[in-house]
Amino acid sequence: MTIYSSKIDLKSNIQIKTPLNRCCNCGTTTALSPVLTELKRSRFMLLAGTEITIKQELPYCPNCLKTAKRQPVGMVSKFLMAIIVFFPLLVSLAFMPDSIMNQIPTPIILLSFYLIACILVFWFYSLQKPIGEQTSYYQPIRLKKIKQKFSGEIIGYVLAFTNQQYQNDFIAANRDEINKTTIEIISA
């Protein structure tokens, strides 16, 4: 039996029905708990940006509970993290022998350090893998896009799912909104 929880987003008046019959990450149907999950979408223009958050109760099993809070990490965030890792590498310049510093141009050393920092950061994130039956180490449902009018009114969402079974349940529960194109589903 499928149970639905209905929430209304007051800013957009789009009704999203959340299937609660299986874990949205691994798909198990036992020991489920609804967890208020924040699906976020950020937009940046140079130094300023906006963030829109949809809070939705989604079903998680005990094994997948931690994934409810883990926001996916984008490429820009990874490169910014590499800059943070880069600075401690700069400190090592003070300990480099003068013979090396005189033979290799400083820009080459700095570029090498940044590449090392990028490799370290991307290696770290590559270790973040789903455990067991999980379909994602991060949130299994992603807010990919927000459709808005020029006035700012939200007229639709584009969502991506890592769990195909849960995606099918979600599509069945939200057929009307999908037909009106206020909710669009894409591959994760």
Image: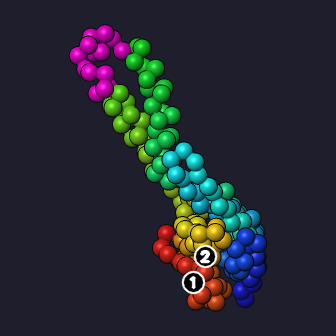
Residue lying furthest top = 98
**In this figure, what is the number of numbered marks?**
2
Q: Secondary structure at mark 2?
A: strand
Q: Which residues are magenta?
A: 96-109
Residue at 49%, 69% in the rendered image: 188
Q: Are marks 1 and 2 in contact (CB under 8 Å)?
A: yes
Say if residue 69 shows up in the picture: yes
Q: Secondary structure at mark 1?
A: loop
Residue 85 is labelled as: none
10 Å crowding of disc 1: few (<14), some (14-19), many (20+):
some
Q: In the image, residue 28 lies at what x, y percent?
A: 64, 74
Q: Is residue 56 above or below residue 21?
A: above
Residue at 67%, 77% in the rendered image: 22
Q: Is residue 65 left or right of residue 125?
A: right
Q: For the residue marked with disc 1, what is the amino acid?
A: Thr
Specify how the rendered protein is coloured: rainbow
Q: In the image, residue 16 lies at what x, y percent?
A: 69, 78
Residue at 68%, 66% in the rendered image: 54
Is 103 magenta? The answer is: yes
Residue under pointer 1:
181
